Image: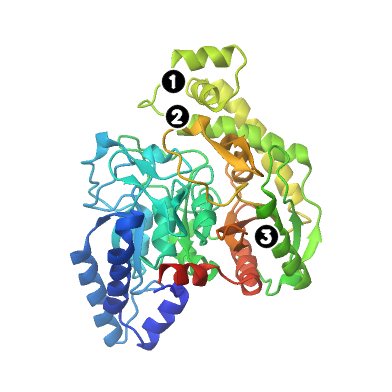
């Protein structure tokens, strides 16, 4: 059932559908599509059915279990759920089964959600594709030969095909936004710290990871607005926006990547979307200065690689030597990031704070910034080359995938909220997403704009539904 979670919740409340029927609908989609797509890699349907039956019994008694009462969900492999595997795509952790729920899972269950499965990820969540040696490759439902994105690729596919009503992903460098973009769904990279990371740690690690966040993924932006208040830490409640129309938003727009090529077909879809929103009343403003964005990108690469480096993946002496000789490709940057000193990290963090202050100054006069998410629509699978060696075909020419980190890095090192939402369909028949960035902890304003924009731009999943049959 490809209705939004918000509409499903309305029908559950009115009694038009039961929680058990809705769960059965999601499981039917799982049975129909998962063999081809490989999105959901673990199920626990006995407990889920008991939870759905309990939700129906509560409804019959006139009680509500919370905002997510009866909604079936899957969650990303790396987010702990008691008794379920949390492998991080690493064969060494295939038997890792946490004994307690992550904070966010506890919150979702407490709000009435029915969680029946977990979704696929790349190894260590370290890729913009989703494949690993345990579960294999996840494919894009729009075209099985295309990437589902990563690292929350299984999550986005589960949502796009109706296997779940809501999902939870994580994002340290685009891992919610890339898959949302490639699969035609909506995902929120939340403000850093807004949602607890407890229960989302690599096996054997306990501390939170800098730049990393958890956030909701849904078929409609309104679904994210439904889920987010359940997920955030109560002491960090973000401000409620008073804006009710697009004409109340002043928005900067940047559609061309200053550090790399942007596919003309993607840019055309995004420009059309911006034109429609402007015609509907959105007030345009200038984007930030280029120096702010490019320096944030550079700092984000260094801090992000340091945050994602771990003892299970020691750097090669060859790559360290190349870095010392001046190389700045992905492998060299990652190798150096694993050995930076605390003093060097402090220097990077100070530079990051300068960027954060500059963004605060920009958003003092502008509400939001609209950008692309990736340079292209979903590319063909490419699992033979390492991440750093991979390319994208942009306007007919091969370009390094690292050139495309620019858009994701605007938000992660600076802790900003960033919404990925569908903007339209490109000439190749694949979805194109729009990124909406806002001030730190102003997640609700970002979502409000997204909901208003979605009414203008429409939603592509009806096209996917037609393809799936």
Depth check: 104 or 397 in front?
397
With 21 as the anchor, is 209 left or right in this view?
right
Quadrant holding the N terminus: bottom left
Could you say which quadrant of the image residue 96 lies in? top left
Disc 1/disc 2 C-alpha distance (Å): 9 Å
Q: Earlier in the sequence, mark 1 or mark 2?
A: 2
Disc 3/disc 2 C-alpha distance (Å): 36 Å
Could you say which quadrant of the image residue 397 lies in? top right
Which is in the foreground here, disc 1 or disc 2?
A: 1
What secondary structure is found at the residue carrying circle 1? Answer: loop
Residue at the disc numbered 1: 315
Q: Residues within 10 Å of mark 2 (few under 14, many from 20)?
A: many
Q: Residues within 10 Å of mark 3 (few under 14, many from 20)?
A: many
Quadrant holding the C terminus: bottom left
What secondary structure is found at the residue carrying circle 2? Answer: loop
Residue at the disc numbered 3: 269
Q: Is residue 452 above or below residue 188?
A: below
Depth check: 2 or 311 in front?
2
Which is in the foreground here, disc 3 or disc 1?
A: 3
Which is in the foreground here, disc 3 or disc 2?
A: 3
């Amino acid at each position: 059932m490809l209705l939004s979670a918000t509409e499903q919740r309305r029908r559950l409340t009115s009694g038009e559908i039961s929680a058990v029927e809705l769960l059965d609908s999601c499981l039917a989609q799982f049975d129909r599509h998962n063999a081809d797509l490989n999105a959901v890699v673990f199920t626990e349907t006995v407990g889920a059915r008991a939870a759905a039956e309990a939700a129906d019994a509560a409804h019959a008694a006139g009680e509500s279990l919370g905002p997510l009462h009866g909604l079936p969900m899957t969650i990303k492999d790396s987010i702990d759920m008691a008794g379920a595997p949390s492998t991080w795509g690493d064969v060494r952790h295939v038997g890792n089964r946490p004994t307690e729920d992550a904070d966010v899972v506890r919150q979702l269950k407490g709000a009435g959600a029915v969680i029946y499965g977990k979704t696929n990820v790349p190894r260590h969540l370290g890729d913009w594709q989703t494949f690993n040696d345990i579960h294999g490759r996840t494919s894009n439902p729009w075209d099985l030969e295309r990437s589902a994105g990563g690292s929350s690729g299984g999550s986005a596919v589960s949502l796009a095909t109706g296997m779940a009503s809501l999902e939870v992903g994580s994002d340290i460098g685009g891992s919610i936004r890339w898959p949302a973009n490639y699969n035609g769904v909506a995902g929120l990279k939340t403000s850093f710290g807004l949602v607890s990371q407890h229960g989302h740690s690599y096996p054997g690690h306990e501390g939170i990871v800098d730049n990393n966040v958890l956030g909701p993924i849904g078929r409609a932006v309104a679904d994210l607005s439904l889920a987010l208040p359940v997920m955030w830490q109560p002491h960090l409640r973000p401000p409620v926006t008073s804006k009710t129309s697009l004409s109340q938003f002043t928005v900067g727009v940047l559609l061309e990547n200053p550090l790399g090529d942007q596919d003309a077909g993607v840019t055309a879809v995004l420009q059309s979307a911006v034109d429609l929103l402007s015609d509907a009343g959105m007030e345009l403003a200038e984007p930030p200065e280029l120096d702010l964005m490019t320096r944030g990108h550079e700092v984000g690469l260094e801090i992000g690689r340091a945050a994602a480096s771990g003892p299970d993946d020691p750097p090669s002496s060859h790559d360290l030597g190349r870095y010392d000789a001046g190389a700045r490709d992905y492998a060299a940057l990652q190798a150096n990031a694993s050995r930076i000193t605390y003093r060097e990290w402090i220097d990077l963090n100070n530079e990051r704070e300068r960027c954060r202050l500059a963004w605060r100054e920009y958003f003092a006069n502008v509400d939001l910034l609209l950008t692309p998410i990736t340079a292209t629509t979903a590319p063909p699978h490419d699992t033979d080359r390492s991440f750093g060696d991979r390319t994208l075909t942009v306007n007919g020419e091969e370009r390094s995938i690292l050139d495309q980190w620019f858009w994701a890095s605007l938000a992660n090192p600076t802790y900003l909220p960033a919404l990925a939402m569908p903007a339209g369909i490109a000439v190749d028949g694949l979805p194109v997403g729009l990124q909406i960035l806002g001030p730190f902890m102003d997640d609700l304003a970002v979502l409000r704009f997204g909901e208003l924009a979605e009414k203008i731009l429409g939603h592509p999943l009806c096209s996917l539904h037609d393809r799936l049959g």
